[in-house]
Image (spheres, helix red, strand yellow):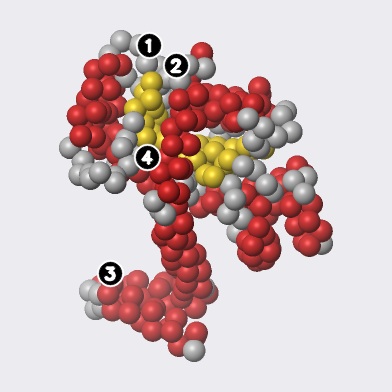
Amino acid sequence: MQNALVEKLLDNERRAVARSISIVETSNSDSVQLLKKIFPKIGSAYRVGITGPPGAGKSTITNQLTKYYRKQNKKVGIIAVDPTSPFTGGALLGDRVRMTEIGNDEGVFIRSMATRGSLGGLSKRAVDAADVLDAAGYDYILLETVGVGQSELDIASAADTTIVVLVPESGDAVQAMKAGLMEIADFFVMNKSDRPGSEQAIASLQTILMMREHDEKSWMFNIIKTIAPENIGIVEIADEIGRHREYLTSNDLLLKRREQKTKVRIKEIVENKIKSELWNESGEILLNSSLVKVVLGTSSPYDIAEKIVENFKRNEL
């Protein structure tokens, strides 16, 4: 059954793509088997992360950038990560509603995904979904994350190029620095640049960027000015993505960066696997039976933690 699904996925059959992403979202043994089967077919797509504070216009930029790539006859997969609904556990905002212009294009596949408690704003399953789109033959995968004010550093573990979208209001240059977005940006977009204060915001951001250490071989950050609803600056964004891709490729950094991201991902998979096996029935029983001792002061939390780990090791041997 799964072999037939994989064949249809590799032929870019839309139903198979949707079904495969649904499987990887379940995070069970079927998803692991599917990801193993398609892994030899991934690596061709270029992954672009788009992040920034709420209201910056990330979805509009994603929409316009997709239309630009489609004019270049490139296939685009979009993973829009939304806050998890407290009622259904599903994606709350539903980006497909906001992207009706491109949603019916056969060369575009859009999937809204819930953060499912991921503090970095990017669902761990979104990375697996990107693998599915990669295997299905999409040329570009755009990963748009929620902007909820916290550090969104995990997008840097998923994208080849990361764009941070800012707007002139609210001191976003300083806010970006506080949130850690300065560390993950490969370049910045100052959207809504026709609004008052945009030049001051750009100057402030440039001052911050100039303080970063760099040498003659370092990637030089740019700030692209856009008015996304009017499609102003979108070509420049695409050109900057291409320039960054060329920089990574010509300096043998693309493969190295992907190796580093893979290392982080494998560690995460191992940690999640150990965590799920650690808190099996026996682990929970040992924990619950020891709580009274900790409360009464006859045993410390560290003593109990060591016992749980020892119990796990014995069960694994």
Give the labeled residue for mark 1: 194
Q: Position of residue 316 (x, y in %)?
A: 50, 84
First in sequence: mark 2 vs mark 1: 1
CA distance for labels 2 and 3: 59 Å
Image position of 172 (left or right of 7): left
Question: Is any atom of residue 216 visible in this view?
Answer: yes
Give the labeled residue for mark 3: 295
Give the labeled residue for mark 2: 227
Instruction: Residue at the far left: name it.
Output: 211
CA distance for labels 4 and 3: 49 Å
- Are dots 1 and 3 in contact, CB under 8 Å? no
Q: Position of residue 82 (x, y in %)?
A: 52, 37
Q: Please give the name of the residue rendered at 22% of the width and 25% of the height, measured from the top-left corner.
A: 204
Circle 2 packing at 10 Å, graded few (<14), some (14-19), many (20+), is some
Circle 4 packing at 10 Å, graded few (<14), some (14-19), many (20+), is many
Query: Which quadrant of the view contains residue 52?
Result: top left
Label 2: state its secondary structure: loop
Q: Please give the name of the residue rendered at 81% of the width and 58% of the height, measured from the top-left corner.
A: 4
CA distance for labels 4 and 1: 23 Å
Q: Position of residue 42 (x, y in %)?
A: 61, 55
- Amino acid type of disc 3? Val
- Amino acid type of disc 4? Asp
Report the disc number at residue 186.
4
Label 4: state its secondary structure: loop
Between disc 2 and disc 3, the foreground one is: 2
